[in-house]
């Protein structure tokens, strides 16, 4: 079944969600992406991305190019911004990774967080209600190796919040669509 990869404008097959990392790696074979490319992938205006850099939500591009980690941070923020204020999103990211402009203190890099989330989001309709999400989160993070004790628990909490917010955003969008059709 076709779907739009969360936080992006990229179309794909839900059944290929486990291969999203390969798709992204191929986009970065020639190096980083320009602001216009990131804007195209995310559907965000370039000034929004630049504003997020100025506000310290992500590190500045290097040589006017965004690496995969930066793009995944942008996408992670983008997929949550429909239901959570930016301050809450950045607090959530900081809960997991400390200073958002310093990658040395990260418990999980933004690429791994994004790819884990995509896998969960692809299965969300099959996972069932929220009561089943904990089992899915444990399964999704089974291969994660904690850099410090308690990191996996933090990762699971963040993923659960992200999944809840994303599902809420999809429900909100559907309600808005139905209202517009009245």
Image (cartoon, rainbow, N blue to C red):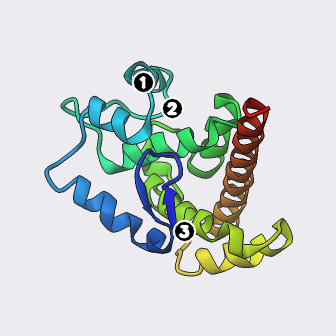
**148 with respect to 130 (left or right):** left
Dot 2 or dot 1, earlier in sequence: 1
Q: Nearer the viewer, residue 113 or 5?
A: 5
Q: What percent of the width, then of the height, locates residue 6? A: 53, 52
Q: Residues within 10 Å of mark 3 (few under 14, many from 20)?
A: many
Q: What percent of the width, then of the height, locates residue 75? A: 48, 44
Q: Is residue 150 above or below residue 65?
A: below
Residue to which mark 3 is pinned: 119
Quadrant of the image occupied by residue 155: bottom right
The Cα atoms of the two marked residues, 2 and 3, are separated by 24 Å
Residue to which mark 1 is pinned: 45
The Cα atoms of the two marked residues, 2 and 1, are separated by 16 Å
The Cα atoms of the two marked residues, 3 and 1, are separated by 26 Å
Dot 3 or dot 1, earlier in sequence: 1
Residue to which mark 2 is pinned: 57
**49 with respect to 125 (left or right):** left
Q: Is residue 134 above or below residue 91?
A: below
């Amino acid at each position: 079944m076709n779907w739009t990869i969360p936080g992006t404008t990229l179309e794909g097959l839900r059944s290929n969600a486990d291969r999203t990392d390969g798709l992204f790696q191929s986009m970065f074979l020639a190096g980083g992406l320009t602001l216009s490319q990131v804007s195209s992938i995310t559907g965000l205006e370039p000034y929004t991305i630049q504003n997020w850099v100025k506000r310290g939500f992500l590190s500045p591009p290097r040589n006017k190019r965004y690496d995969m980690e930066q793009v995944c941070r942008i996408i992670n923020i983008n997929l949550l911004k429909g239901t959570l204020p930016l301050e809450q999103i950045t607090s959530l990211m900081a809960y997991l990774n400390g200073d958002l402009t310093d990658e040395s203190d990260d418990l999980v890099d933004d690429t791994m967080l994004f790819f884990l989330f995509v896998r969960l989001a692809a299965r969300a309709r099959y996972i069932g209600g929220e009561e089943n999400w904990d089992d899915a989160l444990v399964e999704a993070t089974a291969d994660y190796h904690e850099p410090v004790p308690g990191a996996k628990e933090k990762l699971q909490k963040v993923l659960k919040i992200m999944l809840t917010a994303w599902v809420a955003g999809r429900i909100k969008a559907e309600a808005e669509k139905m209202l517009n059709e009245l």
